[in-house]
Image: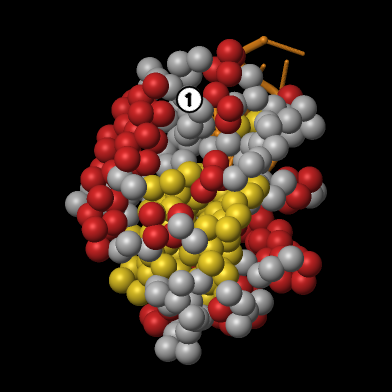
DNA sequence: ATGGCGTCGGTTCGACGA
């Protein structure tokens, strides 16, 4: 049994298109590095009846999905071999599951939470999150984003009071600081970097969450998303908008946090690339 | 330089993403 777990998040921009890459990435990690014990996906863009449970099951992973046609959709994928013996199927792997922010009436599938009983440690509460894009500060979608952020914060406060081992991971659609933006001067006040969004991000940190990536020395100009246009990836014109935030108890045991750029170099990639945090077992 | 790309649904283009 390994003494740590690796949790990850990846906005796949259509699981239908990207399933082969998800499987390849998980297999590569198993073979070459350390297995990914849990992977939170965003932007499935498919309904639950189209979710590829069998393909992932055959690869050794069990899933819980909250899907939607065309847009949004989130999932949590867990490596079966990493689970405590009490877990045998989805109902015993994904404990206390929550779809959507309770009390926040929203048909957009952006939140999926569950407590995962990994072997040799207390269950970890994972929140797979796909934050609204916001479009632009003048847009109705931006107002929706800010209201959603408020609802998220208030719900997470409650979640944290009940779960001291919690990770919030996914596509936040917020670049927390100028160090997370390839050309901050071009982006001043715009969507993804506006003061309102950054303030909401700060308020999440003030709940007792830590941006795991910034706990460690990182290469400058590290990003998790690059625009498909204008050769964004080749120019490294990107942003760091995918994050893994950890509660105090998990932060204290976090050994590493990184962005794996490799899948972004593959044929027909997602515009986002996976982010990973490694957490020592208690 | 903000367009230009990718995905979807449903048709041959618009909405949306970030």
Q: Is residue A159 left or right of residue A58?
A: left
Q: Residue at x 28, y 35 (%)?
A: A147
Where is mark 1, residue-wise?
A193
**Viewer-side residue, A275 vs A50:** A275
Query: Residue at point 54% right, 17% down?
Result: A187
Percent of width and height locating residue A161 = 24, 58
Q: Position of residue A213 (x, y in %)?
A: 56, 45
Tell me if mark 1 has few (under 14), some (14-19) or many (20+) residues whose alpha carbon lies within 10 angstroms of its own: many
Q: Is residue A33 left or right of residue A116?
A: right
Q: Which type of secondary structure does the marked residue at label 1 adopt?
A: loop
Residue A23 lies in what quarter of the image? bottom right
**Residue located farthest toward the front when viewing the structure as drawn:** A252
In the picture shown, does residue A169 fall above or below A139? Answer: below
Asked if residue A73 can be seen in this view, the reply is no
Residue at 25% in and 63% down: A162
- Which image quadrant for residue A143? top left
């Amino acid at each position: 049994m390994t003494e740590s777990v690796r949790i990850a998040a990846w906005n796949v921009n259509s699981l239908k298109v990207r399933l082969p890459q998800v499987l390849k990435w998980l297999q590569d990690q198993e073979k070459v590095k350390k297995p990914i014990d849990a992977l939170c996906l965003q932007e499935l863009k498919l309904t639950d009846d189209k979710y590829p449970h069998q393909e992932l099951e055959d690869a050794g992973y069990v899933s819980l999905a909250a899907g939607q046609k065309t847009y949004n959709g989130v999932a949590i994928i867990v490596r079966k071999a990493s689970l405590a013996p009490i877990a045998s199927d989805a109902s015993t792997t994904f404990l206390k599951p929550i779809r959507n922010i309770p009390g926040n009436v929203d048909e957009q599938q952006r939140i999926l939470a569950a407590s995962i009983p990994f072997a040799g440690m207390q269950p970890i509460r994972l929140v797979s999150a796909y934050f609204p894009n916001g479009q632009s500060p003048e847009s109705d979608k931006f107002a929706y984003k800010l209201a959603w952020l408020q609802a998220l914060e208030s719900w997470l406060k409650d979640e944290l009071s009940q779960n001291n081992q919690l990770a919030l991971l996914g596509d936040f659609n917020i670049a927390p600081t100028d160090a997370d933006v390839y050309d901050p001067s071009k982006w001043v006040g715009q969507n993804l970097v506006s003061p309102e969004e950054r303030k909401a991000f700060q308020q999440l940190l003030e709940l007792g969450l830590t941006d795991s990536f910034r706990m460690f020395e990182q290469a400058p100009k590290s990003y998790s998303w690059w625009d498909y246009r204008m050769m964004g990836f080749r120019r490294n014109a990107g942003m760091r908008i995918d994050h893994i935030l950890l509660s105090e108890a998990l932060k204290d045991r976090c050994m590493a946090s990184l962005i794996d750029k490799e899948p972004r170099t593959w044929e027909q990639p997602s515009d986002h690339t996976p982010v990973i945090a490694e957490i020592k077992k208690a």
